[in-house]
Image (tube, coloured by chain):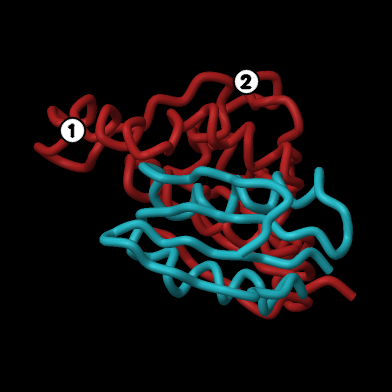
Amino acid sequence: MQKDATLDAKGLMCPMPIVQLAKKVKEMKSGQILELLADDVGAKEDVPAWCSRTGHQLVGTEQEGNILRFYIKMK
Amino acid sequence: MTDKMCMVVSEGTFDKAYMPLIMGTAAASMGTEVHVFYTFFGTGLLKKVAKPRLPGMYRLFTGVFQKKMKKVGIPPHDEMMQQAMDMGVSFYACSTTMDLMGVKEADLKKGVKVLGAAAFLKLAMESKITLFIG
């Protein structure tokens, strides 16, 4: 999937992936796509929950082994 | 209007110290306004330098825990509290227990406000979530 930026949150545990995510989106523009990498099992549910609360759109999720890859479209 | 969340922290051990910071930073990152009120044994966590230890005999393993947490990206207590503040989380010290616990206003971290029960309850009544950590 095409992306405008990547945030690597591998190795970080809850709540750090979404804390970093909230910081990162401030640097992004509306319509851009952010790729987020995480290996915290909690992120699987946390990222969709974060998106539904903040209004950013989760446009794709992939998993390779224990690495989760999220694509988030900025509102 | 932004959603509000309130927490009361009445214990000062390592586990109780981190819970409001983890919940608070997570909530703040979701755009929620977060207020944390420290009372009784929690009040000491608001001092300029706070080094909470695990409860009981486990206190001896605090360092091991701290190292593990650092490894997964969770910073030391004071650093994480500062991070929460930078994200807009508000921290309050209970005025009555400050006296009781021997914590002076000058001992508090910058940005911490002293609050009475009624003022905090007003915030709690306006909140969607109120958690008690003790």
Q: Picture quarter containing residue B82?
A: top right
Q: Is residue B1 above or below residue A23?
A: below
Q: Chain of mark 1?
A: B
Out of A29 and B75, give the one closest to the viewer.
A29
Dot 1 surroundings within 10 Å: few (below 14), some, or many (20 or more)? some
| Residue B78 vs residue B122, the one in the foreground | B78
Q: Nearer the viewer, residue B56 or B69?
A: B69
Q: Earlier in the sequence, mark 1 or mark 2?
A: 1
Q: Secondary structure at mark 1?
A: helix
- Determine the residue positioned at 44% across, 69% down: A62
* Marks 1 and 2 in Cβ contact (< 8 Å): no
Residue beneath disc 1:
B59
Q: Is residue B109 above or below residue B58?
A: above
| Chain A: colour as depicted | cyan
**Which quadrant is home to the C terminus of chain B?**
bottom left
A75 up-or-down from B49: above or below: below
Residue at 73%, 60% in the rendered image: A33
Q: Quadrant for the N terminus of chain B, please.
A: bottom right
Q: Chain B in the picture: what colour?
A: red
Residue A39 left/right relative to B101: left
Report which quarter residue B123 is drawn in.
bottom right
Q: Is residue A35 left or right of residue A55?
A: left
Residue type, numbered disc 2: Asp
Q: Amino acid at mark 1?
A: Arg
Q: Furthest-left residue in view?
A: B57
What is the chain letter for disc 2? B
Label 2 crowd (10 A; few <14 / some 14-19 / many >=20): few
Residue occupied by mark 2: B107
